[in-house]
Amino acid sequence: MQTITTLQAVYQSLEHVMDPEIPVLSVLELGMITDVKVDIEGVHIKMIPTFAACPAIDLIKENIKNAVERDLQMPAFVSVDKEVNWNSNRLTAEAKEKLRDFGIAPPGRHGGEVNLDMLIKVTCPHCGSENTYLRSPFGSTLCRALHFCRQCGMMFEQFKPLS
Amino acid sequence: MQLQQAIQELITKMADDELVIGHRNSEWTGLGPVMEEDIAFSSMAQDKIGHALALYRILEEHFGGTHPDQFAFLRNAKDFRCCHFVEMPIGSYDFSLMRHFLFDHAETVRYQALAQSKFAPFQHLAGKVKGELKYHTLHADAWIIQLCTAGEDSRWRMQAALDNCFQLAGGLFEPGPAEDLLIAEQIYPGEAALYKQWLSHISPVIGKAGLVLPEMTSPVYGGRTGQHTPYLQQLLNEMGEVFRLDPEATW
């Protein structure tokens, strides 16, 4: 039953499921999808939230289910994968570029642990200056921090690096 | 005591601490001294309540416990196992900030230890929570140092807040009846060990801030055996008010 073409169709469908808080990124680009299987019952998708207390998780699950069922005309079952934890290295390079264009500084790549410098030394997504400071590690959503750029005088948000 | 029961008690006290401090943090929403602090305490509230939910889910899924919402909203104070420290009203910002500093470092050492637990659900949850807590302690450390080095009046107020909080914070490490069993089974290293690690985490910041660490002479125990301050029932009445209007409602 599981064919490569069906799997491809599922991934194509997922490319159009956007994060409700960062509408320029799909759940695939965010690295939220951990497994896709197709069997006689339908499509089984495993996903993970970026932050444990993410309030958007149920909405995202619902959006995935609806998109896949609509595009493939098959039942879809979406569950949270308890074996895998999200970390910010799961963001694709393309996703980071889109984040920057959206005005959010992307997280740097970490080597297993996030050090203080990664939180504090952040390039301004507006003017590219490195003359910035961390205003608060908490922003408008759990996955963002607030920074200020001394060069262009703008506040900006950073997608937090997470190990 | 059976190991299964001991693990459930450990989860319940941790989860109740998270839920109650989360609710207290949320009381700063709209009232923070500056906008960033308003957002910070609101975000931390969300994180803590998320951690509580994850722990209540472990109870539900691994021990046949009740649904997390019902467990959180329908119990009375005497059935809660949180410590007095988290029950205290938010007071002024210096008290809340100091509580956040002491609590979040305690939470950090706890989850660091749980990352090595023989109880697999702890390992997984700890992996997730540990990274997030870095932002909490970064926030707490930065403000403690900033306020303590901002002048004599400011430093004095932070010292008073530390003095007010310290014995209460000792209650986070109230040992349970099954410590030896949990340690032997490598579920966690026990409260006494966590307390020592906690001291080694907070001491450098306390030193940098120019504060004097009080002696832990009489840690405030009782919460883990269901004895609470009157503040807890008041908090629970408010927290569960809407839920209890219609416990069967779906949202």
Image: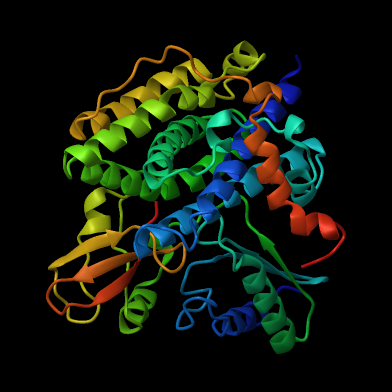
B25 above or below A152? above
Q: Residue A159, image x and y in percent?
A: 37, 67
Is residue A86 among the parts visible in the rendering?
yes
Tell how many labels.
0
Please report the residue visible at 75 percent of the width from the left and 24 percent of the height from the top: B5
Which is nearer the eye, B145 or A108? B145
Residue B204 versus residue A90 in the image, above or below: above
Residue B14, position in %: x, y?
A: 60, 34
* Residue A120 quadrant: bottom left
Give the image quarter of residue B105.
Answer: top left
**Left/right of residue B234 with respect to residue B28 in the rendered view:** right
Q: Which colour scheme appears in the figure?
A: rainbow
In the picture, measured across the screen, residue A91 lies left or right of residue B46, that is: left
Q: Is residue B72 above or below residue B1?
A: below
Q: Residue furthest front?
A: B153
Q: Nearer the viewer, residue A100 or B15?
A: B15
User: Residue visible at 63% across and 30% down?
Assistant: B229
* Residue found at x 65% / y 59%: A80
Position of residue A132 measured from the top left corner of the image (x, y, whole percent): 17, 67
Indicate the position of residue B79 as horizontal and vertical percent values.
Answer: 76, 32
Residue at image x 59%, y 29%? B83
Q: Is residue A112 visible?
A: no
**Image quadrant of residue B125?**
top right
Please state, as top left, top right, bottom left or bottom right, where the N terminus of chain A lies in the image.
bottom right
Horizontally, residue B150 falls left or right of residue B35, namely: left
B240 vs B106, nearest the viewer: B240
Between residues B154 and A109, which one lies in front from this camera angle? B154
